[in-house]
Image (cartoon, grey):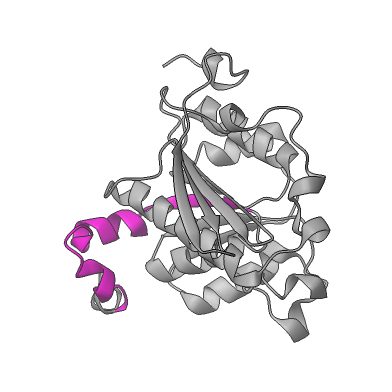
């Protein structure tokens, strides 16, 4: 690291569990973030600020006025109507011009997603529908890539980490084929804006811990937030021996 980097990241480097070695791991890391909405905004902004060396951000949607209440990576006047990944890239490059940002503006099919996931250290799910989450989970299991999953709706949120190293649960152990998208979208149910920030920040924290191999990550542990009463719960998720995704993967 050069002198400027030592100063920029000094407050992290001061932490005994991070140090220069941990910061160098972040600088050398590559992370894929799917979705530049309410969750992807704080995830990408914190990882960029923290010095993750290469962020690959993916979103094929466009910025809408209704997004701005919670999708803090986008700004009002000049971003409405442009692609979310491109908008996010502009913000992230201003936050930290030293890191590399790759914006993917098209929807990835299974092979294209597989190719991207194979290149990264961690994948973070910031999507809002089960079809995308199931596909992302399947590819991460196949490639044995850690997946940090999060969701937020109304005044509730959840985070869980799937290590995908041949043991532990996967996303399909948690949700089955009949999961209902309509019941879990912000457009249908609404969401309190800081809740996505809380959940996204936790996802960013877990990704950094995985990259640096520090602390105890939420591997197969579902962290649940009820922001209305500000209660937290943690549930252990066992792997499903009949799971159609992870039970068929060889260790």
Quarter occupied by residue 234: top left
Quarter occupied by residue 82: bottom right
Q: Say above or below: 49 vs 223.
A: below
Q: Say above or below: 195 vs 249.
A: below
Q: Say above or below: 244 vs 130.
A: above
Q: Position of residue 142 (x, y in %)?
A: 54, 25
Task: Work out which quarter of the rendered image holds the N terminus and state it.
Answer: bottom left
Q: Nearer the viewer, residue 111 or 149?
A: 149
Q: Is residue 27 left or right of residue 231?
A: left
Q: Is residue 120 visible?
A: no
Q: Is residue 77 left or right of residue 155?
A: right
Q: Is residue 8 left or right of residue 126?
A: left
Q: Position of residue 11 (x, y in %)?
A: 26, 74
Residue located farthest toward the bottom when viewing the structure as drawn: 77
Q: Is residue 16 magenta?
A: yes
Q: Position of residue 162 (x, y in %)?
A: 47, 36
Q: Nearer the viewer, residue 104 or 147?
A: 147
Q: Is residue 222 visible?
A: yes
Determine the residue positioned at 76% across, 63% down: 190
Determine the residue positioned at 46% across, 55% down: 232
Which range is magenta? 8-34
Quarter occupied by residue 130: top right
Q: Nearer the viewer, residue 161 or 152?
A: 152
Q: Position of residue 112 (x, y in %)?
A: 67, 37
Determine the residue positioned at 73% across, 27% down: 177
Determine the residue positioned at 70% across, 56% down: 59
**Numbered label tally:** 0
Residue located farthest toward the front when viewing the structure as drawn: 229
Task: Work out which quarter of the rendered image holds the C terminus and state it.
Answer: top left
Q: Is residue 103 magenta?
A: no
């Amino acid at each position: 690291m050069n002198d400027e980097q030592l100063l920029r990241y000094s407050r992290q480097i001061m932490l005994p569990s991070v140090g220069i070695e941990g910061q160098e791991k972040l600088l050398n890391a590559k992370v894929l973030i799917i979705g530049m909405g309410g969750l992807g905004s704080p995830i990408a902004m914190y990882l960029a600020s923290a010095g993750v060396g290469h962020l690959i951000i993916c979103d094929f949607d466009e910025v809408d006025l209704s997004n701005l209440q919670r999708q803090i990576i986008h700004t009002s006047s000049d971003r409405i109507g442009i692609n979310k990944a491109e908008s996010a890239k502009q913000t992230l490059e201003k936050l930290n011009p030293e890191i590399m940002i790759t914006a993917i503006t098209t929807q990835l099919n299974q092979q294209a997603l597989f190719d991207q996931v194979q290149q990264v250290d961690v994948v973070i799910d910031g999507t809002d529908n089960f079809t995308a989450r199931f596909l992302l989970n399947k590819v991460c299991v196949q490639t044995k890539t850690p997946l940090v999953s999060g969701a937020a709706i109304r005044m509730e949120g959840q985070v869980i980490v799937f290590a995908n190293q041949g043991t532990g649960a996967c996303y399909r152990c948690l949700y089955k084929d009949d999961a209902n998208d309509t019941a879990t979208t912000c457009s249908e149910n609404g969401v309190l804006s800081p809740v996505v920030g809380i959940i996204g920040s936790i996802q960013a924290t877990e990704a950094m811990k995985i990259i640096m191999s520090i602390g105890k990550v939420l591997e197969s542990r579902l962290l649940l937030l009820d922001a209305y009463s500000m209660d937290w719960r943690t549930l252990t998720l066992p792997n499903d021996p009949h799971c159609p995704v992870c039970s068929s993967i060889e260790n």
